[in-house]
Amino acid sequence: MVVCVCVVRGRLYSSCVQSSMLHGIETWPVRKENEVPLQRAEMRIISWMCGIKLQDRVPSEGLRGRLGLDDIISVLQQNRLQWYGHLLQKEENEWMKKCMEYEVEGAMPRSTPNKTFICCLQYFDTFGSASGRAFSL
């Protein structure tokens, strides 16, 4: 009975909380400093839902397994690939497709240049998806 309650809680979390946390995030490049707070917030919510305290020292994968959830970053990558599929179906003259291929003119900053949407997808293509399946651009 407890397992059933955890799975229902996981589905509720996935459909309501996780989708709200990731709303619109697939359209902009996420940096590591943006990923870490997302993961921390997710784990605090999951621990609270399972009734686990930090002192119990239960691993994150164990808690996600109880609820039947994937890591929030892998869900983000899946959403990003889904968004890319929608972009590929658009016609060439639509503004979204033009924005995807737009290159900013001018001098690049001295620091590391900002990631573009295509750079994020190429990085994901290099390392494959969280489920072990790879795709090609």
Image: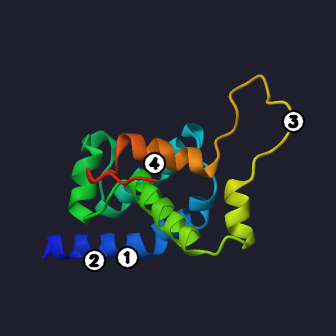
Q: Is residue 71 left or right of residue 92?
A: left
Give the spatial CA distance, label 4 vs label 3.
35 Å
| Residue for badge 1 | 12
The numbered mark at residue 64 is none
What is the secondary structure assignment of the residue under circle 2? helix
The numbered mark at residue 39 is 4
| Residue for badge 2 | 8
Q: Is residue 30 visible?
A: no
Image position of 90 with respect to 74: above or below? below
| Residue for badge 3 | 106
- The amino acid sitting under disc 3 is Gly
Give the spatial CA distance, label 2 vs label 3.
52 Å
- The amino acid sitting under disc 2 is Val
Give the spatial CA distance, label 2 vs label 4.
21 Å
What is the secondary structure assignment of the residue under circle 3? loop
Which callout, 2 or 4, points at the residue further toward the start of the chain?
A: 2
Q: Position of residue 94 (x, y in %)?
A: 72, 73
Which callout, 2 or 3, points at the residue further toward the start of the chain?
A: 2
Which callout, 4 or 3, points at the residue further toward the start of the chain?
A: 4
